[in-house]
Structure formats: structure tokens, C-alpha cells
Image (tube, helix red, strand yellow):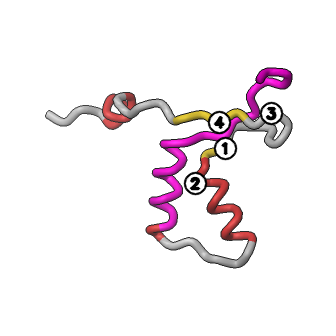
């Protein structure tokens, strides 16, 4: 019998978080940032680009963090 996908996803490591207080207001994955930047300069994303963005989103997340923390 196959295990549910939710259980397999829970075995993935937590993404690395980079706190950027004052620069962003909500969490966003690195892949989404890169995808947004390339889209803004006119580069269309293909299936490979979307897979890479998803992979980067699972590995690194930019978060607002807390102000006043070093």
C-alpha cells in the first residue's frame, strides 16, 4: 500500500530561513522571488523554471523576522 503524500512531505527538512526585518512584510520563498524578478524583466517561465522555483521555495524562505534583533 502507498503512503499518503502528506506523510511523505512531513519527512522533508525545514527550509532555511533568512530574516530580513524592514525589507519584506510576509514570508516568501526564494524561488518565488527569483520568478517574480525574471517575470518583471520579461522572461517567461517554463516548466523547468517552475520546478526550480518550487525546489528553491522548499529549501529557503525569506521572512520578515523581528525588528531590533541582531
Crowding around mark 3 (Cα neighbors within 10 Å: few <14, some 14 to 19, many 20+) is some
Instruction: Answer with mark 2 or mark 4, whichever residue precedes in sequence.
Output: 4
* Alpha carbons under labels 1 and 2: distance apart: 8 Å
Crowding around mark 1 (Cα neighbors within 10 Å: few <14, some 14 to 19, many 20+) is some
Foreground label between 1 and 3: 3
Q: Which residue is mark 4?
A: 18
Q: Please identify the quadrant where the N terminus is shown.
A: top left
**Label 4 element class:** strand
- Residue at 70% across, 78% down: 42
Give residue 31's mark: 2
In the image, residue 10 lies at what x, y percent?
38, 29
Q: What span is in magenta?
A: 49-70
Q: Please identify the quadrant where the C terminus is shown.
A: top right
In the image, residue 41 lies at what x, y percent?
73, 75
Give residue 43's mark: none
Q: Say whether residue 2 is left or right of residue 39.
A: left
Q: Which residue is mark 3?
A: 21
Amino acid at each position: 500500500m502507498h503512503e499518503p503524500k502528506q506523510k511523505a512531505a512531513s519527512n522533508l527538512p525545514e527550509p532555511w530561513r533568512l530574516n530580513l526585518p524592514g525589507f519584506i512584510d510576509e514570508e516568501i520563498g526564494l524561488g518565488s522571488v527569483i520568478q517574480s524578478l525574471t517575470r518583471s524583466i520579461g522572461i517567461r517561465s517554463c516548466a523547468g523554471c517552475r520546478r526550480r522555483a518550487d525546489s528553491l521555495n522548499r529549501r529557503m524562505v525569506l521572512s520578515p523576522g523581528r525588528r531590533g534583533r541582531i
